Image: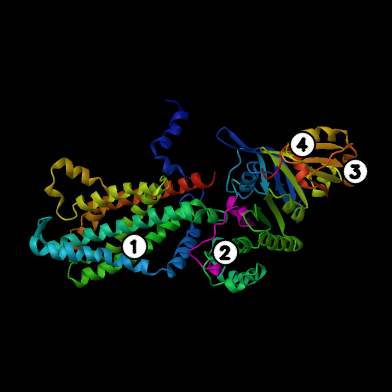
Amino acid sequence: MPAPDILVRAHELTKRFGQFTAVDAISFELRQGEAFGFLGPNGAGKSSTMRMIGCVSPPTGGELSILGMDPVADGPAIRSRLGVVPQEDTLDVELTVRENLLIYGRYFGLPRAVIADRTDRLLDFVQLTERGNDQVEPLSGGMKRRLTIARSLINDPEILLLDEPTTGLDPQARHVVWDRLFRLKQQGVTLILTTHYMDEAEQLCDRLVVMDGGKIAAEGSPRELIDQYSSAEVLELRFHPSEHDQAAEKLRDVPAERMEVLADRVLLYVPDGDAALAAAGDLGLEPLTSLVRRSTLEDVFLRLTGRRLED
Amino acid sequence: MSEQTLRKLPLRILPPALLATRRGALGGKESVHVVERHARAYRHQWVMLVSGFFEPLFYLLSIGVGLGELVGKVQFAGMSVGFTSFVAPALLATSAMNGAVLDSTFNVFFRLKYAKLYDSALATPMRSGDLALGEISWALIRGGLYACAFMVVMLAMGLVHSAWAVLAVPTALLIGFAFASVGMAATTFMKSWQHFEFILLATLPMFLFSATFYPLSVYPRPVQILVDVTPLYQGIAILRGLTLGVVTPGLLWHALYLAVLGVAGLALASRRISRLLLK
């Protein structure tokens, strides 16, 4: 018997397209009220997982239960309690901003009066009240994204699914979207999001899984993952390209938990970045630039997969 | 033959489209929301709606009235019938076909591939069958309005010769249902706009050769049989019988043909949308 506060339970969930395995026997549980993230590069299987949870893609294998129901048998019943923000905007460009919410609400069978009431509230929430009677096409990318978020909330969903919510947005628009999502989280809405931005995952997720090649590489809170898979600090050194390889070789003498040699930089995982920088100087190394920073999820990902997130 | 095989046999005789027995495969009351959406969208471009009234009217004036002056009378079911009266029901059937096909092919293709309308609707409780039924219903509502307008013109011009003509609009809807369903199903197989040439390739000969402008009897027997099995001919035969007052039980077969075609097309369209979008 599943615990009552578990909204989504996946056990060895698998999705294959022909010979290709997009999602490879992953297991996870999502609890009520948490913000849960799938972090991984493009092609990691995040969107396929989201589509299965959204009941628009039948699993090929394993078990999946959403709100205690089976996504294949009870698709419409589950979807009526979900909100979905797809990766690609699917707003209706033949309708105005308000009409987009009206028709989408009607798809859920909601009465017009209820929709009108919620529309006022939601447009206010996503700061689009003045654009209510405008066509959708002239809106900026950030506004369209916010409208899509408002649309996904029209049925007062128990779980909000966000597939790459800020991909393609400029930094300012991203921050506005994050701010709105953070408020939703404060209001107790359960969020599931996919992202290949580690800052997005760190800002929004209480708990996340790192996905790579259709598998879950690690699971935990951002803090736990960093503590477990990375050091407290990271020293980033950049050398002249002609000295890069030689310098990397010499740096092996600096005491570090781990070293990553990238194409353009060398990363040293150490408890104390400044001490390591001094040690490098003692070896006679003269980097072009140096940076001491805290570990991030990017470092966790690099450690787990040997690759960078946004490559 | 074992009992097992026997039990499975009827399933294999039925076309696969009719096997779409999943709940809601033929759509439910939720399909009304698609109609609602289109009605909203067309508020912003009502000119597109009005244009549909004129197409059959222009045909009637040019071919029916203009050509009718030259042709005079046509022999039909042992009666001598004015050419305009003879052609008008066929033009009504053709316009029901064209309207339905236009709505269910070009417009559906755009919504399916470019506007992503069905992707967003399928994230809600809406199902593929609701989308297919909704699109077809919309085509029917639109076609029904045009058919009513056309019937008013026919009445005004004295081209209606029987009270059976009250069934003309429902028949136009049945023709629209058959063609909208098949058109939508066909559209789900299309990969690019070029493929729409095939639609014209199917509808134009039907318009020209389905005994539209002359009785079927002018053809040699093999051609008669060929025309007799094409869908537009069924509609023309019913409408002509109704407006000229030549009503026989045989018309029911034509109606059954169109109904079966419509249901099969709807089931196939629904299945194909699931296949394309719910993968």
Residue A89: in magenta span = yes
List x then y, in percent, for residue A171: 68, 59
Q: Which residue appears at 36% of the width and 51% of the height?
A: B183
Nearer to us: label 2 or label 3: 3
Camera-near label (1 vs 4) is 4
Q: What's the chain of the residue with tag 1?
A: B
Q: Which residue is mark 2?
A: A105
Query: In the image shown, does B73 or A243 lie closer to the viewer?
Result: A243
Q: Amino acid at mark 1?
A: Gly
Residue A209 shows up from this direction: yes
| Label 3 chain ID | A
Mark positioned earlier in the residue sequence (4 or 3): 4
Instruction: Name the quadrant containing residue A226.
Output: top right
Q: Is residue A15 left or right of residue B12?
A: right
Give the number of callouts: 4
Q: Which residue is mark 4?
A: A243
Q: Give the magenta part as a residue range.
A: A75-99
Q: Amino acid at mark 4?
A: Glu
Mark 1 near mark 2, Cβ–Cβ under 8 Å? no
Say the numbered circle drawn on residue A278: 3
